[in-house]
Image (cartoon, rainbow, N blue to C red):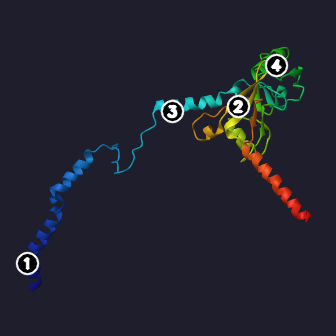
Amino acid sequence: MTDFRLCTSFMPVIFIMSFACITAPAQAPQSDLDKVTVRRQEPASAPPQQKKGERQSSPLRREDVSEAEAAVLPYINNFFSNTRIGPEDVITVDVFDMPNYSRSNITVPPNGRINYPLIGQILVAGRTTEEVEKEITEKLHEYIIEPKVSVQLVQVHSLKLMVIGDVVNPGIYEMTRRMTVTEALARAGYVTRFADRKNISILRLQAGGETLPIKINMKDVERGKARDVFLVPGDTIVVPGNAFKTIDQFLGIVSLGAWMRVIAR
């Protein structure tokens, strides 16, 4: 009986505590509810706030892409777009859906003629790929109905340039792509310490057979004060020596003579 009265006396306290626990979340501060409401009103795609001192990056625009493409196209669409096949070049002739009449990796011999099935010898040196395609297509018409011929220049070995003078490795170099004077000199190990970089010449053969000298000041090119010059096949780069080379050679001869006198004693 005593225990029943004790439990009965605690019932109001237990009821009040349970009611307080149930109603507690509903009595959250108004400031927290306001924060939740404000966050929900923010758009999902809102850009992040820029930190102080941080440089904001702008998206790539369409006009920027076109300018970039316009800058690259002149480098790609150069003299190789109208390159004529020459000796030592490698070409591939493909006839669509006719593997027996297709030939890959044909090296052009020195006489400039290749042997082709059913046709015989074809002169390819000095001609463009389009011209060779047209001739092969016309001659294959006698054996194949509407042949579709594609000629590709796979490797270019006939286009060359020469670098002579005060460079580390003078010689003849292949032009596998469009090159500038700086790139050609880099292939040759660049200029020596005796080179006269202000008076470098490019000897370019003209249509009439004469040679046109083109002067270039590599010191200005290296400093960004002058444009680099693009080369064409057959160009010769001449790097002259300066006066310091003559003085150095003279001092070397004098030193050698003094050394010989010491040995003679």
- Residue occupied by mark 2: 231
* Rendered position, 243 above or below 20: above
| Dot in front, 3 or 4 | 3
Q: Quadrant of residue 78?
A: top right
**Disc number for residue 43:** none
Number of labelled discs? 4
Q: Quadrant of residue 106?
A: top right
Q: Position of residue 236 (x, y in %)?
A: 77, 32
Q: Is there a contact, CB below 8 Å, between mark 2 and mark 1?
A: no
* Rendered position, 175 above or below 262: above
Q: Earlier in the sequence, mark 3 or mark 4?
A: 3
Distance (Cα) linking label 3 and label 4: 40 Å
* Left or right of residue 54: residue 63: right
Distance (Cα) linking label 4 and label 2: 33 Å
Front residue of this view, candidates 18 and 249: 249
Amino acid type assigned to the residue bearing label 1 in the image: Ser
**Disc number for residue 9:** 1
Q: Position of residue 8 (x, y in %)?
A: 9, 77
Front residue of this view, candidates 107 and 4: 107
* Rendered position, 49 above or below 265: above
| Dot in front, 2 or 1 | 2
Q: Is there a contact, CB below 8 Å, between mark 4 and mark 2?
A: no
